[in-house]
Amino acid sequence: MKAHTIKITNSDNILAKNLLNYLKSLAEDKEYDFLQIIEEEESFSEEINQEMNDRYEHYLKHHNEYEDWESIKNKFIKK
């Protein structure tokens, strides 16, 4: 079974608010018992989220520049 996450980050935006309200109304309908709305507080600012996304994108493009955890761990264990 697969689960999907849809993230609405700016609920002040009128389109985002309308979409969220529509999804909430569907989730209340028994026919859509597979739909669940979970509201979460953002733990990071948009700036931090963007920085993390940028770093992850860089890693994906340049993953060969990084050592894996086992290699790093073994270097320290040998000392």
Image (spheres, helix red, strand yellow):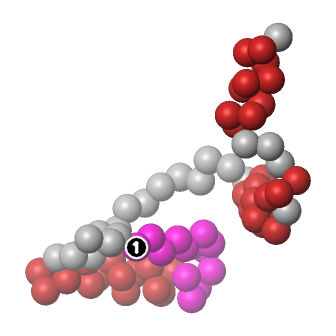
Considering only vertical position in the picture, is 5 above or below 29?
above
Q: Residue furthest left?
A: 30
Q: Is residue 65 left or right of residue 30?
A: right
Residue at disc 1, secondary structure? loop
Q: Amino acid at mark 1?
A: His
Asked if residue 28 shows in the view, the reply is no
The spot of residue 56 in percent (x, y) is 75, 59
Decide whether the magenta segment is chiefly helix, strand or loop.
Answer: loop
The spot of residue 65 in percent (x, y) is 88, 53
Quick check: is 9 in the magenta stretch? yes
56 or 61, nearer to the observer: 61
For label 1, the residue is 4
Q: Is residue 68 left or right of residue 7?
A: right
Q: Residue furthest top?
A: 79
Residue 14 falls in image quadrant: bottom right
40 or 70, nearer to the observer: 70
Q: Which residues are magenta?
A: 4-16
Measuring 80% from the left and 23% from the top, which residue is drawn there?
A: 75
Measuring 17% from the left and 76% from the top, which residue is drawn there?
A: 33
Considering only vertical position in the picture, is 49 above or below 2?
above
Crowding near the residue tagged with mark 1, few <14, some 14–19, many ≥20 C-alpha atoms within 10 Å: few
Measuring 51% from the left and 80% from the top, which residue is drawn there?
A: 17
Residue 27 falls in image quadrant: bottom left
28 or 50, nearer to the observer: 50
Asked if residue 60 shows in the view, the reply is yes
Q: Is residue 21 left or right of residue 64?
A: left
Considering only vertical position in the picture, is 62 above or below 21?
above
Residue 69 falls in image quadrant: top right
Query: Where the N terminus falls, by quadrant?
Result: bottom left
Quick check: is 15 in the magenta stretch? yes
Query: Where the C terminus falls, by quadrant?
Result: top right
